[in-house]
Image: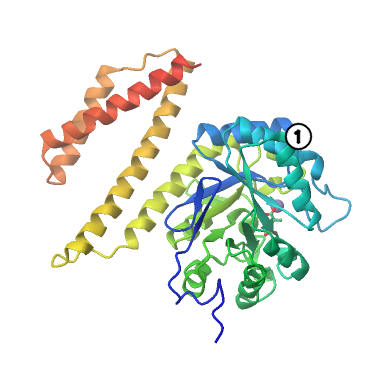
């Protein structure tokens, strides 16, 4: 049997690749958040600035939009690409998912990158309406300059969508990310599509592609339960199942958005979304490592590494919380240090440590530099305002 480049994961090939300094798959995890359709430069700048504040270097930005109705906004087209790349360079964004509908859009992208001398690069997105547009698949497959994100076809089988990815690889480009985005069904209501994120491990088993999930186009609405949107819950399903990437719609003014505003997160909601996703990601990393087998040092070490990854994810969350605290202290005119609050928090930690059977002194030693780093970060942030 012919060994296919993407399908047939039994062949020992590393899943994932690095593009413009960003690793996709192979253990890395990224959220590509941004405008479904770029409408104004101000919205673009505000969105990329929010990503930069969150320490994120990946984004989405729709320029060419395939719309069901010819009377709807069709996207900013080539004219908006320069704004996208200028703004990306200004905000440290390294990789942007941009949907293309035609081979000539690749030339537009290359030209805009050249003219702007942007430090960013592009992940070419093929939308669900084009999953079986074989000419387009061959076009993005013939070039090696950009990797490709292929959306699952909304009304075809998973096998057919995976074979569409194979078309890209067959034409020469094996740097393909496969993106689940729900499937069309009247049974999906009240969601836009029926969420299919149980297929994350299936795609990983059947192929060596990094797997992305698009909860925005899957859920398509903002309804919540327990203070978390369906969008958060669907994202959590994808991430806990091992997704390597998320593609998420964000808009500074969803009510003004010209496309898919109803499903967009606001910029104010982004930090909470990131911290939720990273908490789930930490759990996903941990659960892929079996409980330690005491007789096997290798297994115990793998378990250590997974726990450390979780500790680091929590530290990142703590750091984001410190930034938010600095913002509020600045607005309220309060000092960074509040000794009464610090002592109360230390007493609460000591009580938890004792309950968990941990040594009080050791826990204090661990937390001293963590709290000091948080205060330093807050002071730096306030000084920079
Ligand atoms: C999109 O991501 O903007 C989009 C149009 O998605 P899909 O192709 O999955 O509908
Ligand atoms: Mn959309």
Considering every residue shown, the one lying at the far bottom of the view is 1
Q: At 65% from the left edge and 76% from the top edge, which residue is drawn?
A: 160
Vertical placement of residue 2 versus 277, above or below: below
- Residue 312 appears in the figure: yes
**Relative to 193, 101 lies left or right:** right
- Residue 255 appears in the figure: no
Secondary structure of the residue carrying numbered label 1: loop
The mark tally for this picture is: 1
In percent of width and height, residue 22 lies at 51, 47
Q: At 32% from the left edge and 49% from the top edge, which residue is drawn?
A: 309
Q: At 26% from the left edge and 59% from the top edge, which residue is drawn?
A: 302
Residue 306 occupies quadrant: bottom left
Vertical placement of residue 309 versus 325, above or below: below
Considering every residue shown, the one lying at the far right of the view is 71
Question: Which residue has dot 1 on it?
Answer: 40
Q: At 80% from the left edge and 44% from the top edge, which residue is drawn?
A: 78
Residue 329 occupies quadrant: top left
In percent of width and height, residue 275 lies at 44, 43
**Relative to 77, 3 lies left or right:** left
């Amino acid at each position: 049997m012919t060994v296919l480049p993407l399908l047939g994961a039994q062949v020992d090939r590393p899943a994932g690749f690095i593009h413009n300094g960003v690793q996709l798959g192979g253990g890395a995890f990224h959220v590509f958040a941004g405008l479904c359709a770029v409408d104004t430069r101000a919205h673009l700048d505000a969105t990329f600035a929010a990503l930069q504040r969150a320490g994120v270097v990946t984004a989405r930005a729709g320029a060419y939009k395939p719309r069901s109705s010819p009377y709807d906004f069709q996207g900013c087209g080539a004219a908006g690409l320069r704004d996208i790349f200028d703004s990306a360079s200004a905000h440290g964004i390294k990789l942007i998912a941009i949907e293309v509908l035609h081979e000539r859009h690749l030339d537009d992208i290359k030209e805009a990158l050249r003219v702007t001398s942007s430090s960013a690069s592009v992940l070419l997105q093929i939308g669900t309406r084009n999953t079986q547009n074989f000419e387009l698949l061959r076009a993005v497959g013939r070039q090696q300059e950009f990797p490709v994100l292929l959306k699952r076809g909304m009304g075809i089988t998973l096998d057919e969508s995976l074979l569409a990815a194979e078309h890209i690889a067959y034409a020469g480009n094996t740097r393909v990310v496969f993106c689940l985005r729900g499937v069309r069904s009247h049974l999906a209501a009240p969601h836009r599509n029926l969420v299919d994120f149980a297929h994350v491990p299936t795609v990983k088993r059947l192929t060596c592609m990094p797997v992305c999930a698009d909860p925005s186009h899957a859920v398509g609405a903002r309804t919540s339960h327990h203070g978390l949107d369906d969008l958060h819950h669907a994202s959590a399903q994808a991430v806990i199942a091992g997704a390597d990437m998320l593609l998420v719609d964000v808009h500074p003014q969803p009510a003004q958005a010209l496309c898919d505003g109803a499903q967009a997160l606001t910029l104010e909601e982004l930090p909470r979304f990131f911290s939720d996703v990273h908490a789930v990601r930490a759990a996903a990393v941990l659960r892929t490592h079996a409980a330690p087998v005491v007789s096997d040092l290798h297994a115990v070490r793998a378990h250590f590494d997974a726990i450390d990854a979780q500790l680091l994810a929590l530290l990142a969350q703590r750091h984001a919380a410190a930034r938010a605290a600095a913002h509020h202290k600045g607005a309220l005119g309060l000092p960074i240090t509040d000794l009464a609050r610090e002592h109360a928090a230390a007493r609460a930690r000591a009580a938890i440590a004792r309950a968990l059977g941990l040594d009080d002194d050791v826990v204090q030693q661990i937390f001293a530099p963590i709290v000091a780093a948080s205060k330093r970060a807050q002071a730096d942030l306030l000084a920079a305002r």
